[in-house]
Image (spheres, rainbow, N blue to C red):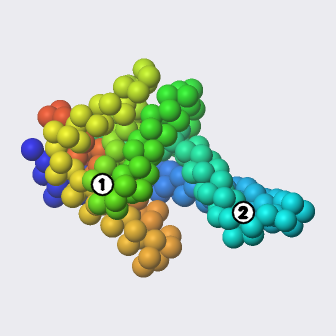
Amino acid sequence: MIDFGSCFSYGIEKLKQNPAFYLVGALIVAGVLLALNLIAQGFGFIVGFAAGLLAGVMHLNSTATTIVAAIIGGIIGLLIGLLIAPVLVGFFKGIRKEYEGGTAEIGDLFSAFSMTGPCLLNYAVATLAIVIGLLCCIIPGFLVAPLTFMTVFFLAKGQTQGLEAFKSAWELLKKNPIIILWSLILHLFVAAGVLLCGVGVLVTFPIAASAMYKMFQQALGEDNPSPVLPTA
């Protein structure tokens, strides 16, 4: 049974309890995402420029060449974006440490680089499932949208063999479809931090991430976090 109110409150309390980890962690995640986006745009520009030269030299159809270049650039951008996976898993490992009674530190953000392979593999499959859903029809894409963070959640819990994390995420989502609704609400909450004030995402993202972690634990029937300590 998922109690969304308790999950959201948990996220707020965790941010208040350890702002150093959550705020700096969110800043690092945002910074890595920005860097990857800039790199992807750079590759996209190079591909587009090369396609333009090729079309001119070989007298190819410019429209068709542009479309192909855009597709190739998009694929490259998607692949580069997958590199955020170890950082997200590291962030969730910090959340897991807090959930189990410890105190997360900035170093936890980089603790998943030792399992980069499983992180990239499972995150890539989860992302591919969403992309296929969006291509088939927008609605299926939204229905499987929680899979990325659910996969990150299981990776943070140590499921690193093959596609174990993705499979666990898929099974949990099938058993608890209400996660789709609550995940959408949390994503909108994160988006509000971006739209209302750019730096606001440094607050909304860690709250949503902690809320998601507790929500997934509730869905598993294993919700027994350490008591949240009162803040001054």
Q: Is residue 232 left or right of residue 81?
A: left
User: Residue visible at 69% across and 70% down?
Assistant: 63
Residue 207 picture quarter: bottom left
Q: Measure the alpha-carbon separation of dots 2 and 1.
A: 30 Å
User: Residue visible at 46% across and 62% down?
Assistant: 202
Mark closer to the observer (2, 1)? 2
Quadrant in the picture for the C terminus: bottom left
The secondary structure type at the circle numbered 1 is helix
Q: Mark 1 highlights which residue?
A: 140
Please, which residue is most extreme toward the bottom here?
196
User: Residue visible at 16% across and 43% down?
Assistant: 176
Name the spot of residue 56 as percent of width and height, x first.
86, 67
The first of marks 2 and 1 along the sequence is 2
Q: Mark 2 highlights which residue?
A: 65
Label 2: few (<14), some (14–19) or many (≥20) C-alpha neighbours in 10 Å:
some
Q: Amino acid at mark 1?
A: Pro
Q: Amino acid at mark 2?
A: Thr
Name the spot of residue 75 as percent of width and height, x first.
60, 51
Q: Is residue 135 left or right of residue 208?
A: right
Label 1: few (<14), some (14–19) or many (≥20) C-alpha neighbours in 10 Å:
some
Quadrant in the picture for the N terminus: top left
User: Residue visible at 14% across and 34% down?
Assistant: 221
Nearest the viewer among 178 and 223 is 178
Name the spot of residue 160 as percent of width and height, x first.
43, 24
Up-down: is 208 above or below 82? below
